[in-house]
Image (cartoon, helix red, strand yellow):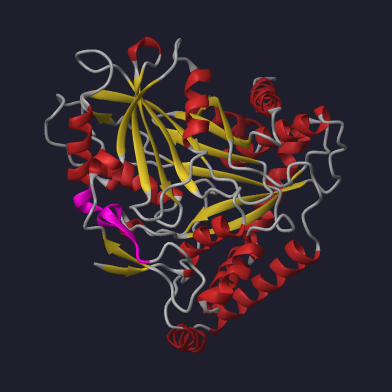
Amino acid sequence: MTDTLTALDATFLELEQLDEGALMSIGGAMVFDPGAQGGGPALDEVRDRTADGLLRLPRYSARLSDTKVGGLSWPHWVHDDRFDISRHVHRATLRAPGGDRQLCDFVGRFFSRPLDRTRPLWEAVVLEGLADDRWALVQKTHHCLVDGVGSVDVLAALLDHEQRPSGSRPVPPPDEASRQPWDPLEQHVPQALIQAGAAGLHVARGGAHAAVHPRETLNRSRGLAELLVRDEIVGAPHSSLNVKIGRSRRFAVVRSSLAELKAIGRKLGGSVNDVVLAACTTGLRELLLSRGEKPPPRGLRAMVPMNLRQASARLALGNKVSSLFVELPVAEPIALLRLEKIAQATRKLKDSDAPAGVDTFLDLAALAPPVLHATFARSAYATRLFNVTITNVPGPQYPLFAFGSRMREVLPFVPLAAEHAVGIAIFSYDGGVTFGISADSRSAPDLGTLVEGISEGLEELASLSVLP
């Protein structure tokens, strides 16, 4: 099997090479009820089931042809003849009493270790010892292998959709029509071409597409100009969130419900995504104030990834994402006005050519030979473009099971780019919404302030939404 990385996929490898503090693994912890015999399943059973699931996902048993990027051609995926599932799926026991603090500490340590590029780029741990006899499956995958939305499809491929005895065959998923996933930006995104390949072929395709679709080409050009003017010439503000970071990570969670977030949006105005961003803005504001730092008047700029993956592309790995850059009004002291400003900003972005501008930038970056592409990678994730990543990943709104146990929640983890000390991932599943907050241990020892601020932001908006 040969499968060449796209320029976008390779970007995440380049980011690690450019700065040792940038660890580009995504994933998180899936928490399950106790099995029929209590606790979690046998390790051999997990390994066998995982190996069976990987038959549908051949990249998970493939390695990179070259552990470094930046030569004359992109690396490609090659089958690993030495692949051994026992080197990727392990067992561990959580320290007592097995609560949130111990689980988050484990996740932070787990994501502090880089993946071995000489092997397939993923790892999982069956974690026992959680409170109430629950167990978890903690997993990480390199971002060059899959994006956030694609990882949800991988998740669905490895889990059951009905509760079955441990060791039984998996159940096919429900019809797509029965799914009601959370669309983070509640919009249809143009399916822009994000792929690498021979530069000449890419240019030829682009030229032919421009000739046939001149209006789309005009929109993409206008969007690129808007991106460069608004997000490059007028850069993101300086912040204590953007300092040199190391490899050690801390992790924390905040929980809410999808119904509550929707109710807030209906009463106060704005989408679910606006409510989420407003709560994060409150947390970031409290963090800056606690540091004695004046919140920048223009706000902090968040990079909000968007899904470009078509419904027909389920189980297709690689990255199909673009980004929007949203100003978070951290200088605004009134919670309701923060939400209103965010809702206004996201509506404006939806009506603009900003998504096309980001896509055009990525297409142009893909034309650069690998030896020069690192320059684009650095600029695409520079602190001048954004201060913090806030990513929403829609999960299935029905229960999933594994080894006879019901999955209760997913704690998502977002990687940190160089000089970005904090990142926030939001995952919705079966009516619940979990905020996973990751931070650099050295430059963000006050992570608890951000966590408390996000919780307070949610509570404040909820209290406003019930006022007559």
Relative placement, left or right, of 456 versus 156 is right
In the image, residue 218 above or below residue 126: below
Residue in the picture at 66% in, 35% down: 280
Q: Determine which quarter of the picture holds residue 198.
A: bottom left
Residue 77 drawn at (x, y percent): 33, 64
Relative placement, left or right, of 24 versus 237 is left
Locate the C terminus and report the quarter of the image it occupies: top right
Residue 286 drawn at (x, y percent): 77, 29
Q: Determine which quarter of the picture holds residue 352.
A: bottom right
**Of the pair 36 and 429, the residue shown nearer to us:** 36
Q: Determine which quarter of the picture holds residue 135.
A: top left
Locate the N terminus and report the quarter of the image it occupies: bottom left
In the image, residue 29 above or below residue 315: above
Relative placement, left or right, of 295 versus 198 is right
Relative placement, left or right, of 71 versus 430 is right
Q: How many marks?
A: 0
In the image, residue 202 above or below residue 220: below
Residue 401 drawn at (x, y percent): 26, 29
Q: Is residue 335 visible?
A: yes
Which stretch is magenta? Answer: 54-65
Residue in the picture at 48% in, 69% down: 7
Q: Is residue 233 magenta?
A: no
**Of the pair 211 and 169, the residue shown nearer to us:** 169
Residue in the picture at 66% in, 57% down: 349
